[in-house]
Image (cartoon, grey):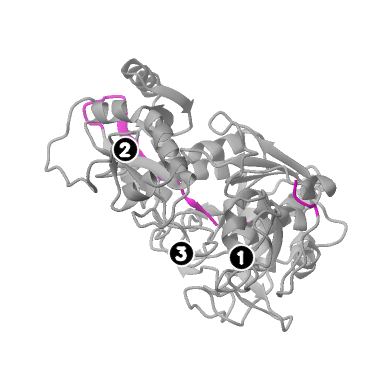
Amino acid sequence: MPKKRKGKKKQSPTKKPSKRSPTRLAFSPGLESIVNESDPLVSRVAKLQDEVRFTVAPSTVSGERIQAQRGRLHTRSLDDFRPRSASVDDAVARLTALGFRILRVGRFGISAAGPARLVMETLKLELAVQSRPIPVSLRATHDFARSFAAPGPADLFIAPTESLTIAQPSEPAIDDIVFIPPPIFFAPPSPTAPTHTFHSVDAARIRKLLNVPSASGGSGVKVAIVDAGFFRHPYYSANGFDYKPTPTQLAPNPENDADGHGTAIAYNLFATAPKVSLLGFQHSDPPQDAIEQAAEAGVDVISCSWGWDNEQTFPILEASIRSVVAEGKTTLFAAGNGQLAWPGSMPEVISIGGVYWNPAQTLEASNFASGFASNQYPGRKVPDVSGLCGERPQAIYIMMPCKPSCRMEMELAGSDFPNHDQTKADDGWVGASGTSSATPQVAGVVALLIEKARAKGRTLLPADVKRILQETGKAIEKGHNAQGAPAIGRPNLAVGYGLVDAQAALAML
């Protein structure tokens, strides 16, 4: 690990930080001046330099690097890429001896952290303060990029300037060091939603349009949502929902939802399955830990409304997702809001697109939601099925609870619909949607299927759930999606097999 790899050094992305910066790190172009004008951003950089998080990929049982499988991991057996136990022990000992802190030993990687100075000195590389891109509208996914505008503290992260994967040829127990940037989440206050004049759907309308039988609730089924956080909003307690922000080792304070996204989209799960038990797992750094710990908590369904654009893949995360699906955890991901979203394009997950119930009270493909043919997985078409979603420009469509003055609320508050949601910036409610909302709607329907299957003494595998949803989806043959794909035929790239029909799906059992 200490040896420096030979080769031409790439140019630093920026100049040296100013005196006010608490680090000696580089900055992405244009970011340093923005940081130095904001005390919260300066504080965030200081905190980041004290703990840079990364994933260690130990050598595998097959001797092949899991990071080298990007784009083809789905064609290989996961057992070939499980770490050798001796490699895990040696890697932990080596990292500890070097001064790094072990955060968690996962299924395919080791989560570790250390000061930026130690990372740079040990790996002989340069780190830079960077920002995830800031969406101009509420999106379910976004790509890792160096372009940004007006970042908040949570948008900043530290990663190498040359590559996100750093090979370790001199370390027998370690294949790679991997840095995974944060995704973009793709939403006391009153327990009652404020009034508004725009066309929308509420929980009752969502149940009606997805054809949810009145007696169905998902009792006894555990659903995990992995997202930004889960503020204890009075809407959930007032309605008696089983809403559990769930602490983990890497995310001990899940009720701190500064973004607002996780708190908001949970509304959609309870709209279709009001009797489920929701375990809210705050997104972790690295991201695979939250997925694995949700599975290990005994949940039946995992719902994720985030990802990366252009099908940018991370093999350790991909392996973790495939692993939990193989264990029988039905896992859903948003297809994106104009992006070519990954992990939403993985064949093992149920990918969720969007259908719009318009003011004429007819159904059409949402022009805000993604649908595409995958470039990573031959023959894979996204989405599989769809939930309800608004339309451009902002998909303001469902009034949802959120943490007062959170980022989502601040961005969307205002009177000028369709660009703003007719709420105040501190009332704890936000008008939004996107495939972020459609995904937990469908996760609720999956919970209903699991509930009924158990009552009949049956076990539904994730492949069974996907097949049932596809075979019973309501055909949508009007409109087009964010990529311009028309809703023609069934399935189609606009909405997949159509809008989920809960009653028809339950009837198949």
Q: Is residue 137 left or right of residue 56?
A: right
Q: Which residue sits at x=65%, y=54%?
A: 464
The residue lying toward the viewer, choosing from 114 and 373, is: 114
Counting other residues with Cα less than 10 Å from the Cα at mark 3, is it few (<14), some (14-19), or many (20 or more)?
Answer: many
The x and y percentages for residue 352 are 59, 61
Q: Which residue sits at x=84%, y=62%?
A: 213
Res 258 → quadrant: top right
Q: Which residues are magenta?
A: 168-191
Identified by mark 2, the residue type is Arg
The x and y percentages for residue 96 are 37, 18
Magenta region includes residue 185: yes
The residue lying toward the viewer, choosing from 429 and 180, is: 429
Query: Is residue 287 visible in this depiction of the protein?
Result: yes
Task: Identify residue for label 1.
Answer: 385
Res 48 → quadrant: top left
The residue lying toward the viewer, choosing from 150 and 325, is: 150
Dot label at residue 339? 3
Q: Is residue 121 above or below residue 438?
A: above
Task: Identify residue for label 2.
Answer: 65
Give the SS element for disc 3: loop
